[in-house]
Image (tube, rainbow, N blue to C red):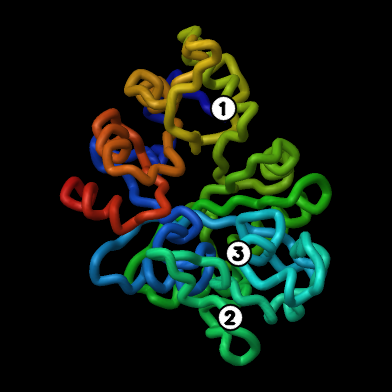
Amino acid sequence: RIMIADKTKITPNPYIRPHGKPLIAAHRAGAGIVPENTLMAFDLCLNSAEFSIDLFELDVHLTKDGELVVLHNRTFDATSNAQEAFGKKNVYPIDYNFSELQVLNLGENFEKDGKFPYRGLRGDNIPEELRVHTVDQILDHVLARGDKRYYWSIDVKNRGKTGAAAADRLYKVLKERDMLGEVIAASFNPSVSKHYDAACPGMRRSAGPPEVLKFYRLFKAGADLNRYDIRYSLLQIPYGVYRIGGREIINLGTKEFIDYAHGYNIAVQYWTINKAEHMYYLRDIGADCIMTDYPDLAYSILADEK
């Protein structure tokens, strides 16, 4: 819970950054420049001579045999050869064992400069870095580098009881690696957020959509957050003004909004920021993190500020 009456007793939030020095986060590990959420993407961020990042953002789903695989969409259809491999649409991770998913080429539909460089790879021709991986494998691969510790934002995509089981599995994986302090548990599913609060002590999480909307209303009212039971320590939010009938309904991208959150030890991170002018703007108003599909672009803009 957030209690800031005596700020000398507050543990500093490591995700709140000095003004003008936001973290650079590779959204889906860099979806704009490499097949998303693949080992290839993580390796590019680790090894590139042109850019570096501070935070990996990724998404996970539970498989039939209880593994957590890295995938953003609800199914493998959009990013892989799943429909061909399994002879049907809507290939959900929860319907297959991890070993069965190894027939998939996660680079199948990646497009760059009008070309599909990994399309058509099958069987033994699928490189290891484009196969389905568990979050355990990805974490261990990055940790093995040893030369830099990264922050992580990991979003459990499952819902209900399956979402709770996925959250428990992620919590176990992180505790085994002593990584709770480096990971943001993100979820669009309120049931998963509630499960973290109830069953996963020490797990730092971001606010879900209903919590973000309530936070915005409290900000507009100038409310004292000490009067509320706030369980999250980060806001991970879109950037932009939302209008209905020409009237501004919500604007999450202002300095005043960020300053209000910081006053209560809450970090503010923005997704998915793919245009240079938006990166400059968010840097200048004090954003704590810029999540982007183009970490190379973000680095070219923000690296000199670090």
Q: Which residue is nearer to you in this view: 109 or 52? A: 109
Q: Percent x, y for residue 219?
A: 48, 15
From the viewer's perspective, is 37 left or right of 18?
right
Mark nearest the camera among 2 and 3 is 2
Extreme-left residue of the structure: 304
Kind of residue indicated by mark 2: Gly
Question: Which residue, given by chain and number where applicable, does mark 1 sit on?
Answer: 212
Tell me the SS state at disc 2. loop
**To which residue does mark 2 refer?**
120
Instruction: Return the x and y of residue 195 as percentages of the image width and height.
Output: 73, 43
* Residue assigned mark 3: 79
* Disc on res. 88: none
Question: Which residue corresponds to the image point at 57% horizontal and 72% vertical from the top-left?
Answer: 108
Residue 284 on image: x %, y %: 24, 32
Q: Residue at (68%, 80%) from the top-left corner?
A: 102
Residue 14 in view, yes or no:
no
Is residue 229 left or right of 49 when viewed as pictured? right
Q: Quadrant of the N terminus?
A: top right
The three-letter code of the residue at mark 1 reads Val
- Res 10 quadrant in image: top left
